[in-house]
Amino acid sequence: MEPLEDFGGPDDRRLHIVLHEPEIPGNTGNIGRLCAGTNVWLHLVKPLGFDLDDRYLKRAGLDYWPHVKISLHENFEAVEAIFPRERMHFFTKKTTRAYDQANWQGGSVLIFGKETKGLPAEIREHYEDRCFRIPTTDKVRSLNLSNACAIVLYDAMRQLNWEPLQG
């Protein structure tokens, strides 16, 4: 595991996905597989709804799980201490600005909430200017977390001319 002090600094060009209190091991496993395939760091904020050695987590990530660059954080404040505000992008259905309005840069941090409740209100309110949504119809409550991560991550990489795949 890479030292945390390397994250968030001016030379950090990697993309990061942060899952705030994820609950479903299969989703986290799918997102881990996505991260392994894109050279993106996965950050998990406790409490988790599963153990990291959960069989569903590993099954969803298949044999790619050993290639996932992962960091575990005790709370969201630990994430805030690492990454500058201007690099953090929060995804929630409770905002009006679409994800394609995000200003992507190397070192961007994509932050998603738990499957059942999304991001806590205090985080959304504190980072209101950094919140984005994936537009959907009113026919669904929300998209699957792993699908949402893939949609946003690939748009960010496209805008960055696929630079993350080179790292």
Image (cartoon, rainbow, N blue to C red):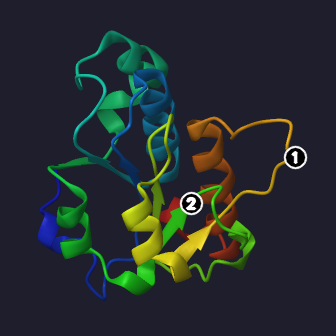
- The answer for how far apart the CA atoms under marks 1 and 2 are is 16 Å
User: Dividing the picture into quarters, in which one does residue 6 lie?
Assistant: bottom left
Above/below status of 84 relative to 141: below
What residue is pinned by disc 2? Answer: 91
Residue type beneath disc 2: Phe
Query: Is 154 positioned to the left or the right of 135 in the image?
Result: left
Number of residues whose C-alpha sits closer than 10 Å to that of mark 1, classed few (under 14), some (14–19) or many (20 or more): few
Give x and y (percent) for residue 65. 35, 29
Residue type beneath disc 1: Thr
Of helix, strand and loop, which one carries label 2? strand
Of helix, strand and loop, which one carries label 1? loop
What residue is pinned by disc 1? Answer: 137
Say which residue appears at 69% left-offset and 41% top-offset. Answer: 142
- The answer, for residue 65, to whether it is visible in the render is yes
Give x and y (percent) for residue 5. 13, 72
Query: Is 49 positioned to the left or the right of 107 in the image?
Result: left
Query: Is 131 positioned to the left or the right of 126 in the image?
Result: right
Say which residue appears at 45% left-offset and 53% top-offset. Answer: 119
Above/below status of 134 relative to 96: above
